[in-house]
Image (cartoon, helix red, strand yellow):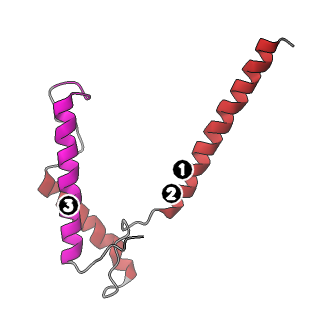
Amino acid sequence: MTTQAKMGEGAISRARAAQLFAGLSLLLLSGCAHPTGGWRNPAVPESQWSSDYLKCRQQAEREAGITNRFNGTGPADDPMDMADREEAGKAFRAYAALCMVDKGYDKPKY
């Protein structure tokens, strides 16, 4: 076998190892995600937390003007559209947080 063929096989196995590592990392990290985004409220049953979080996210989407479709007139990587989406995301997170705090939730800092 030539040196070039051996190098090619090594590159394939390294690429495969990188794919496996990335997939495994995502799997492990997804197990750490909490359905309420980490918000907790000891005054209400834990079974209600996800419902409250979803309601706050829906309200925040309306308040921030977020839709599920691209509203821009230019290409998706247009800097102005990207800035608008970033600002809408910040507003969404702020509205959702205010809603959760209004409902008595807190988000511990780890």
- Give residue 51's quadrant in the image: bottom left
SS majority, magenta:
helix
Q: Classify mark 1: helix, strand or loop.
A: helix
Q: Read off the residue under disc 3.
A: 94
Amino acid of disc 1: Leu
Given contact means CB atoms under 8 Å apart, are the residues at marks 2 and 1 in contact? yes
Percent coordinates x, y for residue 1 in the rendering: 87, 13
- Give residue 36's quadrant in the image: bottom left
Whether residue 67 is visible, yes or no, is: no
Q: CA distance from mark 2 to mark 3?
A: 23 Å
Residue at image point 36% right, 84% down: 45
Residue at image point 14% right, 53% down: 64
Span highlighted in magenta in the image: 74-102
Q: Classify mark 3: helix, strand or loop.
A: helix
Amino acid of disc 2: Ser
Locate residue 110 relative to residue 53 in the image: left or right.
right
Q: Compared to 61, does 2 lie above or below?
A: above
Q: Which mark is residue 26?
A: 1
Q: Depth check: give the residue in front, 70 or 30.
A: 30
Q: Compared to 96, does 77 lie above or below?
A: above
**Quarter the C terminus occupies:** bottom left
N-term mark: 2 or 3:
2
